[in-house]
Image (cartoon, helix red, strand yellow):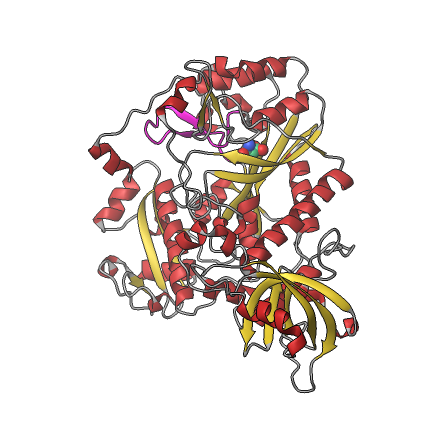
Amino acid sequence: MFCSLSRLYRGLSRPTRRTTQLIWSSFSRSLVLSSQRRIPELSSFVARTNTCGELRSSHLGQEVTLCGWIQYRRQNIFLVLRDFHGLVQVIIPQDESAASVKKILCEAPMESVVQVSGTVISRPPGQENPKMPTGEIEIKVKTAKLLNSCKKLPFEIKDFVKKTEALRLRYRYLDLRGVQMQYNLRLRSQMVMKMREYLCNLHGFVDIETPTLFKRTPGGAKEFVIPSREPGKFYSLPQSPQQFKQLLMVGGLDRYFQVARCYRDEGSRPDRQPEFTQIDIEMSFVEQTGIQSLIEGLLQYSWPSDRDPVVVPFPSMTFAEALASYGTDKPDTRFGMKIVDISDMFRNTEVGFLQDALSKPQGTIKAICIPEGEEVLPIFLKTNNNWNSPVAKFIMEEQGLGLIRLLETQEEDVVLLTAGEHKKACSLLGKLRLECADLLEARGVVLRDPALFSFLWVVDFPLFFPKEENPEELETAHHPFTAPHPSDIHHLYTEPQKVRSQHYDLVLNGSEIGGGSIRIHDAELQHYILATVLKEDVKLLSHLLQALDYGAPPHGGIAIGLDRLMCLVTGAPSIRDVIAFPKSFQGHDLMSNAPDSIPPEELKPYHIQVSWPTDSETKRVH
Ligand code: ASP
């Protein structure tokens, strides 16, 4: 994974893997590049005069005090000191009169924290290090203080050392000292700052905190439950501030935003974890296009200045189109290999499974063409004009030619073909499309430009999907507060499955990084959808229904997943690399060992008891 990271970083002034010095040099440069217009004062209020990374020839002769970690020591003469801003070389004094300074600096183990004071001098001619931003100077130390000694570390702080993620998470505070995590978290902070500036200062949004102790309400992801001291009563951690932000609109706050922590008890994935952060937004008197322009402007404004600028407006695609051409609602539009419907070509086919598929409702035959696919897929339909496949003998000449024309296949391409119900066939080919792209790239075929950020709006989602476990029943595609599409509202009372919604998702390079909708502000309509279509217990949402009846303005909003966004911006392999203290894949904090057990007497005030699983149940959990 790191190899693709380094590829991504080429030319972007971000951490590279060459040498530690180079890493720190590009790191400090990139922070300067993407910093705010006013240069921040990095040494105010503290026991240093300068940072390690900032000293240059222009500081020659200055008396400085630096604080940092011992990164490296050579021959008991040179010592490299590191802080968050970079590295500097320190000369350990050798004369008798400075014996105590020498002792401190030579005996302190690596990664000990020291404070040194001395003079900035130029390095002797020929000893400059052009790879190090501070490479023209060094510090002639006069005094030194050991601020804290470091025990033997479980791993080296050097970047890109192959430590397992579990070890990194267990010693997260050490992992954070590495240049990559420093870069990711600082860039995240800078982007959030820019977002606040854009929203509050340029567009009058109000930053409002909403509760994290809430109650379980229907219609969304699985929520975490928090016991209370009242018997049988529980709080719930909100999966998002959705209801509160709508209530803020009823309260006339008009333009709300929050860097909001959200909780979903759904297990971790590389791009998901039980608690995550959203840039949560809601506006009154707005339509879909208004929200979309706001978000395009927000991303453009907060985008790191050392990346290619964000081009707006973002392209848009309907859900139906995304499914038909890419087999997913989050298409990666950085490359082609689109799905093509070839059903018509095979209407008279003699191939049993194709005939069978076409005779069913919604039955289709679909194909994708993998350019140079022969490299990775020695099977299936190969089009060097001789079809090489178990079904090739059933493909008539004109069908073969038709396929070549429709799919624009060339020598060495491979065609993947599937037959079945439209949605299933598309989503299967959509998955294969991504797998093949990974395989081709692993073989060196360049498909996706690593410097490219391809944003896409996906719109016109269905308002409801049939439930997987019981297709007769419907569930919401986004959440139950999403308004129906005005042109489909007439279907709502007769054929609700046909209604499109005013829901929009923002996709970046094939990842969903945001989603929102125009909301229902009419209490009666909201009640109908909750009670009649979704069969939810409306009592649980009576506060919201009541509020809608008291002059709720038309409103809409969106939430941008900050962790996923930062993961893509930094090219990190997982969202855990852009979160300071993430949970493991299993939802554990490996550093503190959360979740942890509680003695039974401490559970008493909550009137709850642990019902310990049997052996077989425990096995199932793990
Ligand atoms: N609350 C929604 C979510 O978390 C976003 C929105 O509709 O604004 O996905």
Asked where in the image residue 62 lies, by quadrant, the reply is bottom right
Residue 500 in the image: x percent, y percent? Answer: 52, 31
Q: Is residue 493 visible?
A: no
Q: Quadrant of the N terminus?
A: bottom left
Up-down relation of residue 117 to residue 474 (above or below): below
Q: What predominant SS class does the magenta segment belong to?
A: loop
Number of residue marks: 0
Where residue 43 appears, x then y in whole percent?
Answer: 73, 56
User: Does the segment drawn in magenta span residue 568?
Assistant: no
Q: Position of residue 544 (x, y in %)?
A: 57, 17
Q: Which residues are magenta?
A: 461-480
Residue at point 39% right, 35% down? Answer: 596
242 vs 297, left or right, is: left
At 54% from the left and 53% from the top, the residue drawn is 568
Q: Is residue 476 magenta?
A: yes
Q: Residue 139: give x, y in percent of width and height.
A: 69, 72
Q: Which residue sits furthest bottom?
A: 126
Q: Quadrant of the C terminus?
A: top left
Where on the picture, by quarter, is residue 495? top left
Which of the 4 image quadrants contains residue 72? bottom right
> In this view of the protein, can residue 145 be seen by the observer?
yes
Name which residue lies at 43% across and 27% down. 475
Ligand 1 - quadrant of the structure image: top right
| Vertical placement of residue 460 versus 150, above or below | above
Q: Nearer the viewer, residue 271 or 45?
A: 45
Residues 568 and 85: in front is 85
